Image (cartoon, coloured by chain):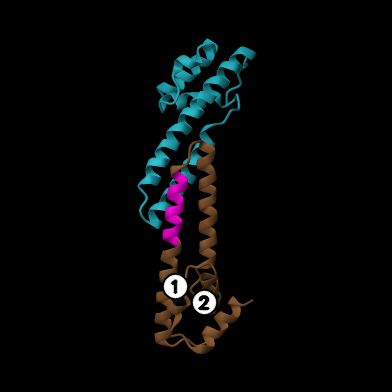
Chain colours: A brown, B cyan
């Protein structure tokens, strides 16, 4: 989607922001999962939670896509959903930051 | 697999034993699931538990098969695994009980 050049230092910044956001999303999901599991009282509650977890897993597999061509979209989405602070992206070129801001403003 | 005639009263006995065993298996799984979920500490623990639950669900879908042709096998398996007391099957014909015992002794 985006054909940009990423310098070695930009790749490092991107990887670090990406991994931190991923850990944040997963940690939140673990907390949510444990709370939901603690509230399970019946087999159907349990199957519903299994379904929910599978769905979230597929969703996360879709979001966390570390292809450079996809990263601006990934970062915009993570910022929008509150999993990434734009300040973590300092070090990326102004061009990339503008693309991300452009995606965010749509 | 088994071409036996089931009287109305045998069907009632079978259904009751089957449902009770099913509830027992599921209640046990819910308890196990909640204990495992409480012990989840990391995303990979969580995914492993999701995988385990899906596997158990498929296994249970395979075990609980209420076709009359399958019931002797189902009951033998449930007795073997401790989810059904043979005493719950009193009321089935001697022929059926012998088939089930035969399966259990194999």
Which residue is identified by label 1? A18
Chain under disc 1: A
Badge 1 and badge 2 both on one subunit: yes
Chain under disc 2: A
Is the C terminus of chain B in the top left, top right, bottom left or bottom right quadrant?
top left
For numbered disc 2, what is the local secondary structure?
helix
Label 2: how many Cα within 10 Å (few below 14, some 14–19, many 20+): many
Which residue is identified by label 2? A71
The answer to whether residue B104 is left or right of residue B13 is: left
For numbered disc 1, what is the local secondary structure?
helix
Q: Is residue B51 visible?
A: no
In the rendered image, residue B50, in percent from the top left (x then y), is placed at: 46, 49
Q: Nearer the viewer, residue B91 or B48?
A: B48
In the rendered structure, which disc, 1 or 2, sits on the residue that comes first in sequence?
Answer: 1
Q: Is residue A89 above or below residue A29?
A: below
Which residue shows up at 48% across the image and 68% down it? A83
Whether residue A33 is in magenta: the answer is yes
The span picked out in magenta is: A26-37
Q: Nearer the viewer, residue B49 or A81?
A: A81
The answer to whether mark 1 and mark 2 are in CB contact below 8 A is: yes
Whether residue A39 is in magenta: the answer is no
């Amino acid at each position: 989607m985006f054909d940009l050049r990423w310098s070695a230092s930009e790749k490092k910044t991107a990887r670090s922001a990406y991994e931190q956001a991923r850990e944040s999303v997963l940690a939140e999901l673990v907390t949510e999962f444990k709370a939901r599991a603690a509230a399970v009282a019946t087999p159907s509650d349990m199957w519903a939670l299994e379904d929910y977890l599978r769905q979230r897993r597929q969703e996360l597999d879709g979001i966390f896509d570390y292809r450079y061509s996809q990263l601006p979209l990934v970062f915009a989405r993570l910022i929008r959903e509150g999993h990434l602070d734009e300040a973590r992206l300092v070090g990326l070129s102004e061009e990339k930051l503008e693309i991300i801001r452009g995606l965010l403003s749509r």
